[in-house]
Amino acid sequence: MLEVLRHIVQEVNAASGLEEALEIIVRRVQKAMGTEVCSIYLRDPGGERFIFRATEGLNKDQVGLASLASGEGLVGTVAEREEPLNLENAENHPSFRFFPGIGEESFHAFLGVPIIHQRDVLGVLVVQQAERRRFDESEEAFLVTMSAQLAAVIAHARVSGALLATAASAGAPAKISGVAGAPGIAIGTAVVVSPIADLYAVPQKTITDRRGELRAFRYALNRVREDIQAVADNLGGELSREDHALFDVYLGILDDSSIGREVVSLIREGNWAQGALSKVMIEHIRHFERMEHSYLKERAVDVKDLGTRVLAYLQASDIEEKVYPENTILVGEELTASSLGEIPRERLAGLISVRGSGNSHVAILARAMGIPTVMGAVDLPYTRLDGRELVIDGYNGTVHLNPLPEVLARFKEVLDSDRELSKDLESLRDQPCITLDGHRLPLWVNTGLMADVTRSLEQGAEGVGLYRTEVPFLLRERFPSEEEQRQIYRNQLEAFAPRPVTMRTLDIGGDKALPYFPIEEDNPFLGWRGIRVTLDHPEIFLSQVRAMLKANAGLGNLRIMLPMISSISEVDEALDLVYRSHREITQEGVEAEMPLIGVMVEVPSAVYQARALAKRVDFLSVGSNDLTQYLLAVDRNNPRVAELYHSMHPAVLQALVVVADAAHSEGKNVGICGELAGDPEGAVLLLAMGYDILSMNATSLPKVKKALRNVNLAEARELLQEVLQMEHATEIHKRLEVFLASHGMEQFIHSPVD
């Protein structure tokens, strides 16, 4: 059964589109289960009806015509209940509905299972038989497993289908969920960037210069033929005649009478050479991968290698300068900072990365630059997006394809509102953050690149609550030397002087891996990361702290912060190393004062030991992103569980109160440097909790300042006491929206647009 499942999933994955995928499913499931009928009903994306989309055994003329509402008929009942329905006599069930013309009169046994992807019922998979019997447990289990395996594939294929619409037909609307990378709304044209020589990442697009593309393809073919012939000649004396014949097979694959002819045919139809090559090679690779014989299956590797070689030459010869339209939305499988830097800033409207997280380097850079970004959009068929009009909702982490006119109009309203708000907020730059009843709350920024500095100062930042020192490490191919670090830190300290700059010691591990210092673990977020790494490698920690202390000479605005602290012993050990570093540079003749040292509260154990931690250091700073993640056991970068990550969760708010009270009981300041601090709703609650510093991305600072200057501390405290009695994050969120609206701040409310 597992082997059958594997083969069906492989075939469906290799399908060119939704219709082919559905046909494969009904044909293969019918055969595997030995039933007389297998059918699929899919929910219409624009409504709540389930449409008869594919069948093996019923009247195919009714495909696309017959449909049921949720709760209507047996199929609608399965969809509504979201559970299997196994019947011996389907016609005796109270929900049974007869469809004339569909041809199911003679079939009595019925088994239907829902197709569910990320809590969304996509459709229903049905098998039927003339014999009156209940399908046994193993058959039901097989169909349930089949449905679960294929749900993501169908979801992906459905979105792909929405993209295949012609100019005359706008296509069905589709919404793809990812992870919010940087806030904001972007409406623009997709430009797909692909990594060098990756057949699976080549965007599909049409061209007019067919002759030029044909010349480029034939040039690339000839270069690869020459390479293979050269390799064969070099190894001629070391290979047997049989082994040497392999190179003849290679050359034969590239021959104009084989794969080469198929590529040429697609180019003549108007496809660009890279896209035509990608399409043909992937089809052949999948063809070989589906073969039963192990020798033939291995040929898929050879075909992939050849395709990659040809593609590399095509990309090398593609010297035409890429055109970036106004309001470019850059799309890629895994965007990098270098690809971001190639586009004129005035043309860049938004970013979408299929892979990556909110902590990815490109996401950090996007937030610093104020570019709406969605990361982790795993269901996005990105290679088909080039030239398509898209909408990015960076507030809620969604991408919209073919949005309905009223939905597009709503996004345009939000975009215009954001632009007007930005103009209004400019006047607040030099104004202090003071509540209506006179409470002063400093607003600091999170930085990691020198590019952040100018924007932070322009927004009126009063200090740096988090300088991510790992960013310079991520940008190199080796550990930076102590002197290189000193210069980087000096630039940051000088840029903000005399404002304080809080430098976090190296925080790698989790989803931040250095290419030259890989950390491979089954569960990296609960593994070797943050202070655990640098305490195990004191040479890294000592070098970094020495560089910080030297950079601070004559300035005195440095603060040092220790990440991922989970026990008192870690703090004691780290403090010993800091004091040692200070003694060493003093002995070298460097006059640098001992800076304030703080601890990041990011894990539950630190919450419960917050008071003991505060006794040992000068300040506490909550990393609310990680703290929320660990309290809720939710990977915030995983789109499958992203909806469970909620910074307004009652447990999170109660933990934040505990930390603030613990720090103040020891007479120490407490700050917060997570995304919650940059959210106007969250900032009001943090004000009420007594946090002394809020640190956020520079783009969020004016909004938070505006919000806090429009409230009283006293009423914020009343609001806090009210929400601390609530049991659901959504209830808290709605209450905060009402509070903002009642204070004339509706523009800060960003509910999802459907």
Image (spheres, grey):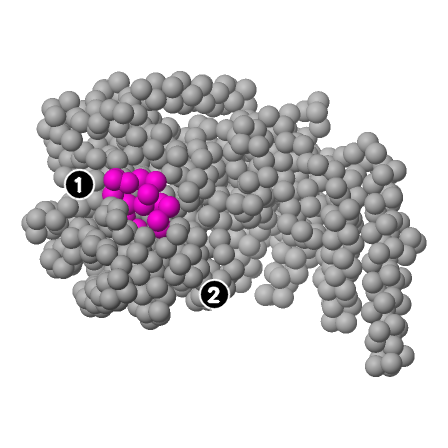
* Residue nearest the observer in this picture, 126 or 566: 566
Where is residue 147? Give x, y as percent.
Answer: 55, 51
Q: CA distance from mark 2 to mark 1?
A: 37 Å
Q: Is residue 435 magenta?
A: no
Q: Which residue is mark 1?
A: 691
Amino acid carrying label 2: it is Pro
Q: In the visual, does 531 lie left or right of 103?
A: left
Number of residues whose C-alpha sits closer than 10 Å to that of mark 2, classed few (under 14), some (14–19) or many (20 or more): few
Q: Which residue is mark 2?
A: 518
Q: In the visual, does 194 lie left or right of 407?
A: right
* Residue nearest the observer in this picture, 161 or 724: 724
Where is residue 258? Give x, y as percent.
Answer: 89, 55
Query: Quarter-wise, where is residue 364 in the image?
Result: top left
Residue at the outermost right position: 257
Instruction: Tell me the number on the disc at residue 510.
Output: none
Q: Quadrant of the N terminus?
A: bottom right
Q: Are marks 2 and 1 in contact (CB under 8 Å)?
A: no
- Position above or below: 368 against 581: above
* Residue 421 visible in the snapshot: no
Amino acid carrying label 1: it is Tyr
* Residue 501 visible in the snapshot: yes
Where is residue 734? Give x, y as percent.
Answer: 27, 30
Q: Secondary structure at mark 1?
A: loop
Q: Which residues are magenta?
A: 489-503
The residue sitting at 82% across, 31% down in the picture is: 208
- Position above or below: 721 against 219: above
The residue sitting at 91% across, 53% down in the picture is: 256
Disc with the residue nearer the chain's start (2 vs 1): 2
Where is residue 444? Give x, y as percent.
Answer: 27, 38
Residue at the outermost front position: 589
